[in-house]
Image: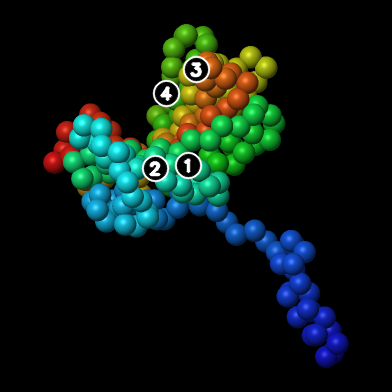
Amino acid sequence: MKRFVVCWVLSILLLPLFGCAPEEKQAAVSATVLEAFAVQEEKAVEQLGLSNAMVDGSNHIYQGSSSWCGIEMDTEFVFKKEKPYVFTAEKVYDDSEKTRVLAQECVALFKEQLGAPNACEFFNRETNNGISYGTYIEEGKEEEIEGEGFNTIFSDDPVIGYPLAFRFFFPSEDESMQKVFVECSFVRMKENPEQVTFTFQILPDITNPDYFE
């Protein structure tokens, strides 16, 4: 019995050394980044460890790094009138099946953390225009529409220059944050159509005049 207990304890201790321990679940957006978007610039900059802002008109722009979907990404933090305006992270991947899987995994992480997206937008070749499904979850067409969207980016005949974008509500009970959104998008740029750019953002609805009051 003692020998069994000793072996069991050793196996638990050795698991991390051999890479067998279960991986820690990653968040789509780090808590630090979410918290920073809900406070004034001075406090947000301190929380994010930022410095040396570039001033562009009424915008203060900081360059930093943060974790998105478990990926450490260069991130730009823009503040306007001492309030967070838009946080943007980008990373470029070569086109491959692994990249498509990674994109789908990222969307799954956003859903797990933020709930169902309130919009899914991509280019519709039939109408030669962008199409946004704002109620596709309620219509029960989630898999169908998302599959169609992913095929516009990941296929033998991909759309160039128009992103597949998922939009989520910012997680806050504060009424002033009701028109702030978190977006994840995937696009093939005209300059490099053989690669896919992942873009993750937090931004307010700029048509909302009350946000900067």
Q: Where residue 100 sits: x, y (%)?
A: 63, 32
Q: Where residue 31 sits: x, y (%)?
A: 41, 55
What secondary structure is marked by label 3?
loop
Question: Which of the two labelled residues, at mark 1 and mark 2, occupies the earlier sequence position?
Answer: 2
Q: Which residue is mark 2?
A: 63
Look at label 2 and name its amino acid.
Gln
**Which is closer to the viewer, label 3 or label 1?**
1
Look at label 1 and name its amino acid.
Asp
In this rendered view, identify the residue nearer to me: 42 or 6: 42
Q: Residues within 10 Å of mark 1 (few under 14, many from 20)?
A: some
Question: Which of the two labelled residues, at mark 4 and mark 2, occupies the earlier sequence position?
Answer: 2
Q: Which mark is residue 161?
A: 3
Could you say which quadrant of the image residue 119 lies in?
A: top left
Q: Determine contact: label 3, label 4, CB under 8 Å.
A: no
Q: CA distance from mark 3 to mark 1?
A: 22 Å
Question: Which of the two labelled residues, at mark 4 and mark 1, occupies the earlier sequence position?
Answer: 1
For the point 45% across and 25% down, the residue is: 121
In the rendered view, tell whether residue 150 sits above or below residue 129: below
What secondary structure is marked by label 2?
strand
For the point 46% across and 47% down, the residue is: 65
Q: CA distance from mark 3 to mark 2?
A: 25 Å
Q: Residues within 10 Å of mark 2 (few under 14, many from 20)?
A: some
Q: Which mark is residue 132?
A: 4
Q: Determine contact: label 1, label 2, CB under 8 Å.
A: yes
Q: Which residue is mark 1?
A: 74
Q: Residues within 10 Å of mark 4 (few under 14, many from 20)?
A: some
Q: Where residue 124 sits: x, y (%)?
A: 50, 15
Look at label 3 and name its amino acid.
Gly
